[in-house]
Image: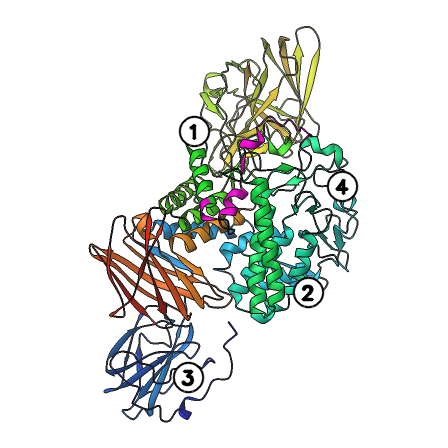
Amino acid sequence: MENKTNSRRQFLKTATLGTAAVASGATPLFANEVMTAQVPLRKGSKLTISPDPASTIFKPLENITVSGFEKGILQVLDGNGNLLFTQEAKAPFTFYTGGALGIQTILLLNKKGELEDWASYKVDGKTEIHDKGSRYEKLLATLYWSMTGEWGATNIMRYNGKIYEFFVGWLRDHVHTMKGMKYFYPNLKSAIELYAEYQQPNGMIYDNIYLRERGKRPSYWEKRFNYGNFMEISDDGLYELKRIPVENDVEYLFLEGLYYTWKATGDTAWMKGLLDNAIKAVEYSTSNPYRWSEKYQLLKRGHTIDTWDFQSEPDLQFCGGDPMVIDKDKTKFGIMYGDNTGMAAGLSYLAEMLDVAERPEDAKRMRQLEKGIRERLNKVSWNGKFFRHHVPEDPTFDRNLGTDPESQVSLSNSYSINRGITHEQAVEIIKTYQRIRREMPKSSPGEWYTIYPPFERGYGGHNGKWDYMNGGVISITAGELAHGAFEHGYEDYGVDILQRVADLALTTNDYLHCTYRGAMPEMPQRNFTIVSLAKSANGDIRGEGAKGVPGWFDQDPKNDFRYIPTGKHSYQDIPFEVINPETNNSRACLLLSSKGDGFIEEAVVPVGKKAASIYFLHTCSKNTNVGSVTLEYADGTSVIDYIDGSKIHEWYLPEDKKGPNCLLGWWGKNDTFTNVGCMVYGYDNPNPDKKIKNIRFETLKNGSMWGVLGITLCDSPVFFMPGTVSFGIPDNWGAGAVTYALLEGLAGVKDKGISYDKVLFAPRWNAAGVTEAEATVKYESSGGYVSYKYKTDHNGINILVTGNGDTMEAEILLPRGAKTKSVTVNGKLQPFSIKQIENSAYCCFNVKAPGVKDIRINLS
């Protein structure tokens, strides 16, 4: 769609428009007349508009009333100058706003078709949902917050003198986030321009851009990726462009990003200027020895978990010990199907863009390449139920990762549903995820795994079992799976996923994280022994203390620790006993410091027992490097543990977690502040078979103050129940996937052209049991949109819909078992057909736009 911003004809030049074309209803007087530029709001007209357009911006499908005339012929032009309707009318006359957004115009004509008067008003809207019960309205708000809460709406960077905007500094993350943010944010093009402008001569696209970690000095990344042109430094030396060598999804993501940016902005000239970059990216991916498998004639990569950027531990021997590095001669490559379904979809997008650019031979070549990749991939990776995670080029190399690779379902299966695979394949993948839901651990938040079942070994460190990429549950998979379910006849399942995602977000403060733990560990069987501090305690938890007993850190009666519950209480599932100072001569804890004032520099607590681990309930002030804890064994040996900021936190504003074994214990208030507290620190005894005679505490001579309120022994290693939230993936990426599932899937607005000039309109509210809903889906970059009001009754479905487009393919999901008797559009019978997708029936018909369409589907 070319940009319609040419100079507008002056209204007074349309002196005679003719009356012969005026008919009852809404027949255009000048069907070919397009007035395209914006005009200011009219002042001085006798026509009056209510509400007052001087103070009102109308939303689509709002009632607007025009008066100030007796009778005449009214015409309404939308923001692009398209004629919405012609109507013989008497004042006051009320109609719905619609058509292209912007400044719209009301013309008053006499019977001869001569212009008598005119007035104008502004129409604008935003992406929003209002459904009966507000469930999905609230979900959309949660998703927007989750797309913007972690990173902000956008990031701005200046590279070699030019300003670029993107959602995340990684091309991959930016493109996937754009699935949701294109409905809310206008500036989309510069991120794609950045990666096109710095494309390598061989066609390689960089992966991410960041400030160098050490200013203008070389970073560790440059040492790791100092080959293959995988790094480039900006002219000013401040920024670095990187390509993670093992990654093989970047080029197809460039194609996808270009395609969806074009559709959202409607800027065809801009798109045409980047097509050669896109073709070079394809040629790189399908020929370069780092990327292309000569054996399988498919895209290849090292053994990573799906589309991620680190290889397994057994593969490190082939890459110098760096999991992100590949060697084209040594790496044990294989086929990860997601790279190939992504490239196949990207080739389809590219062919469509080449058609628009009138480059038919290039388009034909891309489609042939797409066809070949799909055919070869199905032979290599499709097992009849889902795509196999990794098909090795060398099947003799056994990684021995503890899990049957043929059973593993990885996240790109959910992506692939939406990448042009067959309906039959999509259905089998959906059924596979439903099967996973039936068999997954009871503590799992959903079947939306990065990979299932996870690897038992080989991806250690930050990829332990059920975390991050090794069995984490991600909103990315949820969104892609829901989107695919809506489009392939599993609408009830799509709704179910959206509802469970909304419920999951509520467990984390109505914010949707991208990554959750795939399963929670079982609480270990263990026994605890509380160590009494009654004889060792020297300090009070109250600020005033007593004679010979120091008060709490600041020795201020209003700023102390007196409100911590005394007696036996559990924190992080560990029992402690905090002494009541009133029953122990004001002595409730150990207060250690080199400051004097009754604080002690050393304390010895008798134990006389064995323990596999020891837990401390403690806090500090002034400095978190407080001292040391020494376990003195009965055989005369000892072991020392130094206490620093990873094992303790200050009592003001305590954090939830400081280190892997240091979590928040109690928190509460005092008479000065509302957030004070202490931490639980767990220490694994390296000699659990030795009896501990004493535990010795020694403070550093640095002015720090250390308060120890409880000690507990345990016969098992340190264990804290992990939180439900995992890590590693930007939250906006996952929220973007769920947003497009909600808007394209449930709300049912899908762009079939550019800037919604052609629309697939398929609202599926029936599947959610929603009887009334209003929705507007808009690209902020171009103003292309669709807006509608949906309502059902016992006899049918009513829809009032408008937008800026030329045509609309309506596919309206029908209630189960309902039969369509007739369809009317603006009161006129409309031919229709019924399309069956699995067990779902859709009433299908085409609607010519622009304007407001009143649709009625009569059911029996």
Question: Which residue has dot 2 on it?
Answer: 162
N-term-proximal mark, 2 vs 3: 3
Q: Nearer the viewer, mark 4 or mark 1?
A: 4
Q: Position of residue 347 (x, y in %)?
A: 59, 56
Q: Residues within 10 Å of mark 1 (few under 14, many from 20)?
A: few
Is any part of residue 155 visible from this angle? no
Residue indicated by mark 1: 442
The answer to which of marks 1 and 3 sits earlier in the sequence is 3
Three-letter residue code for mark 1: Lys
The local secondary structure at tag 2 comes to strand
Mark 4 and mark 3: Cα distance apart in space: 63 Å
Count of marks overlaid on the render: 4
Which residue is depicted at the point 52% across and 32% down? 677
Q: Earlier in the sequence, mark 2 or mark 4?
A: 2
Left/right of residue 546 with respect to residue 461 in the rendered view: left
Magenta-tinted stretch: 395-424
Q: Is residue 418 magenta?
A: yes
> What is the number of the mark on residue 327?
4
